[in-house]
Every structure is written in structure tokens, then in C-alpha cells.
Amino acid sequence: MLKYYTTQHDMPQIIQRQKLLSGHPCGAGYLTRPVTIAVPAGTYMENVVIAGFWGEALTLAFAPGVYLRGTVEIRHCGEVSLQAASLGDACVYPTGAQTPVTARAVQRLRLKSLYLSGYRGRSTATDGSEYCVQAQGCNTVIDGCGMEYSRSACLYAAGGTASMHACLGGCTGDNPATNANLGYAARGAEGAHIALEDTYPLAFIAHYCGSGMATYRVGTGCVGTAGGMSEPGSARVTRTFLPSFHCTYTGSSRKAYPNNKVIWQGVYGQYRAGYNNFNTGTLWFDEASAALAGKTVVEDWAFITHSGGVAEDTLAQLTELVKSLAPFREVFLTQAGCTVSSHCGPGTLGVLFLRRE
């Protein structure tokens, strides 16, 4: 089956081989002519699996602005290409310490003009992605790609052949907090044949690992070149604002700043008739209001929150409606907590987003 994305921000559709017949000539996973699937711009929080396609070439063409926050696994296929028009148009980067692209028993695999990043949230030299591309028993061509955040090697090839041409990525040093490739640019095993041409990703140890019963060819003048991708979304700034005024109500007593510098919040103890044993605190932030005045704040995400008892079809229709009304990067489905659910009851729906003019 092939799992891929058909529209911006969609959940993935799992396309059986028979369904591919409706638009392309194939049968039982055999393509009788080349097939190209266009992947539109968007951020996709899923993993892609391509398996069992033979015959003519299958190509996934990523439009500018595709960010796949997951992995791609390709296995037991003839010819498969993942490509973008130019480097920076599309990126593949997992949300954990997985390898962005893995392939097994692929007759010809081509990766062109893609950023392939290991886990970008690593904090030590051992908790990140081991490779950017891992190919076993494949003939792999990596052309004009960026590879970074690898722990062992940017490319690992076990058996088969592999070549990297005009690739870049990483930085100097071995600081795991950076996008450095901490091992090799290429590493082979099981008799793999690997070629490096023009440029290759910068790696801390060396451009290739001389063990593993693999052979290497490094082109004349081929050098390691640094580089890295940019994640989508506008720059985020975190600021801390101190309260300009606060007031605490303890039962019938009012304690205000500056005479009182202690804030009580929450409800303490069990309320009893005749006893006002509760404390409520209120804070004002004048500096924050002044800082946001006249600014446009548009959050990248929207949340559809419900209290349960809502049909899946209704949630799906509302999700599509929200996407059509505003250019949110992602729309999340969440379930309301006990407070909202108890006050509003079952079947409650809400759309949450931030916009300030």
C-alpha cells in the first residue's frame, strides 16, 4: 500500500493498489507507465509508507512548502523518486529519533532537492536520529539534498550502490544542540559501493567510514559543505511581563498592591455556611497590553474542542470548514476537560484560535 497526503493539512489517506487504478494504469502493484503524485504545500504530521510497486517509475513530487514531520519508508519497489524543484522547497524531519528516509530492496531510489533532517530536538550525542538516509539492498541516488542532525552517518548503505551529488548540511564541531552531523557523511556495509561527487554534507569524524567491507569513490575536489533547513512558521518570541497591579480577596477582606505584596489564589478548604474561607487573586499586566497594542497576532494553529458525543463525520466536516475559512498551518482535534464538559454538557463544539488586530 501507499500512504500519502492528498490535500493540505489532511490526515493521510491509505491508498490500496486497486484504488490507484482509477487514475493510473496499474494492476496488482504493477505500473504500466510512469506515475507522478503531486503533494501540495502543507505541514503533515504523519509517516509515509510506499511498498510493493513495480514496473514503471513512481514519483512523489513535493510542492514548495511541504513539511513532512514524520518519516518515509520505501520497501520492495522498482523505481521510486521523492523530489522537489529546488532545495528548500520540501523537508522531511521526524518528531523523534527516527531516520527520516529508510529503504529496503528498492531497485532504484532517487532523492532530489530535499532537506532530510534527523531529530531536531536532540539534546545529547546519543538521543538523536542515527541516519538521515538508511538504504539496505538498494541502488540509491541522492542529488542536491541537505542532510543534518545525524548521529552516525548522513547516509548508511548496506549492500547495493549509493551516490551523493551536490549535497550539503550540518556545521562544524560536535555540539549536539546544533545541526551538526556527529559521525560520517557516508557509511557503508555488506559490500556497498558508495560515490561522493561535487559536495557532501559536513561531518565531524570524516566524509566516509573506511570499514564495513564497502568501497568508496570520492570525486576530485569534492568537499564537505555546511547548510541547514528552516522550519516553517513565523519567528516566535517569548517575553516575561511582571504584573503591574494585583488584588487579593480573602473572604470579605480586600488586600491590594502595593500595601500588600502577597498574592493568594485558588480556593482553600471546604466552604461552610457562615465561613468565607476562600482566597481569590487577580493580576493586571499593563506592560503586556501596551506591548501588544496595534500588533497583529495570528496563531499558526487552531483547535476544535468538543465535550464528547460528537459524530466523527461532524468533526471531519468542521475541520474542513475551518481550513477553508483561514490559512491555519494545523488544525487539532482536542477533547474538553471536566470543567467545560460539566458546564456545557455533551455535544459541545468550540473553535479556538488567537487573532488580535
Image (cartoon, helix red, strand yellow):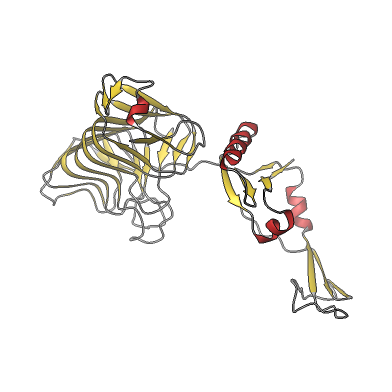
Query: In the rendering, at what x and y percent does residue 346 appear?
Result: 67, 52
Q: Residue at x 37, y 27 (%)?
A: 19
- Residue 223 position, x and y percent, is 26, 40
User: Quadrant location of residue 49?
Assistant: top left
Occupied quadrant, residue 302:
top right
Q: Residue at x 25, y 54 (%)?
A: 205
| Quadrant of image for the C terminus | top right
Q: Is residue 54 above or below residue 174?
A: above
Q: Is residue 178 left or right of residue 350?
A: left
**Between 2 and 168, the one nearer to me in the picture:** 2
- Which residue is located at x 35 percent, y 45 percent? 100
Query: Residue 214 location in percent, x, y?
Result: 12, 45
Is any atom of residue 169 visible in this view?
Answer: no
Residues 252 and 269: in front is: 269
Q: Nearer the viewer, residue 201 or 132?
A: 132
Residue 27 shows in this picture: yes
Instruction: Indicate the quadrant where residue 80 lies.
Output: top left
Please state the total of marks drawn on the protein image: 0
Identify the image quadrant of the N terminus: top left
Rendered position, 152 above or below 105: below
Q: Position of residue 351 (x, y in %)?
A: 67, 44
Horizontal arrangement in the rendering, residue 334 relative to residue 135 (left or right): right
Viewer-side residue, 235 vs 338: 338
Image side of residue 67 versus residue 112, left or right: right
Q: Is residue 159 left or right of residue 328?
A: left
Q: Residue at x 34, y 55 (%)?
A: 173
